[in-house]
Amino acid sequence: MSKNESSDKNLSSLLNKEGIATGTITINDLREREFNGKALSDIEKKALANFDKYRISELNKQVDDISFHKRYRELQVMSNLGNYEEFLNEKYSKL
């Protein structure tokens, strides 16, 4: 399985979870709340920090512009649609 196939599978896995419909709190929702001066819980701050580390790690793995921009778009989708609680999982905390 290539890196792109693996990342596509990971993205599909994340986006197929329940909770993506209305009412899900996303990474971008947390960013917006923080930007507007609203306090975030420690858990929400941890999810943001984990996502940021994951995003940087994933983008640094890309070897050319095409793969970088593809992964960048995938990460945007994750932050726009995925539940922020996904980024509390241990695999994101170990980065």
Image (cartoon, rainbow, N blue to C red):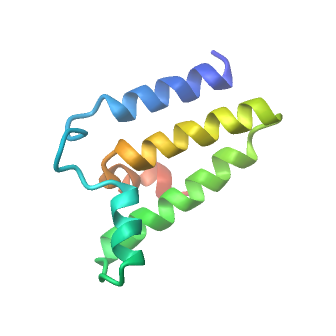
Where's residue 26, x and y in %? 33, 54
For the point 48% across and 23% down, which residue is it?
9
Please state if 5 lies on the left or on the right of 46 as rendered.
right
Where's residue 42, x and y in %? 33, 77
Please state if 85 lies on the left or on the right of 8 as rendered.
left
Q: Is residue 21 above or below residue 33?
A: above
Please state if 30 lies on the left or on the right of 92 as rendered.
left
All told, the count of numbered labels is: 0
Q: Residue furthest front?
A: 36
For the point 35% across and 33% down, which residue is it?
15
Quadrant of the image containing the N terminus: top right
For the point 43% across and 49% down, which residue is it?
79
The answer to which image quadrant residue 61 occupies is: top right
Q: Is residue 5 above or below residue 25?
A: above
Q: Residue furthest right?
A: 64
Where's residue 29, x and y in %? 33, 61
For the point 69% across and 46% down, which residue is it?
59
- Of 27 and 41, which appears nearest the observer? 27
- Of 36 and 74, which appears nearest the observer? 36
- Of 12 and 69, which appears nearest the observer? 69
Quadrant of the image containing the C terminus: bottom right
The answer to which image quadrant residue 87 occupies is: bottom left
Q: Residue furthest left?
A: 23
The answer to which image quadrant residue 12 occupies is: top left
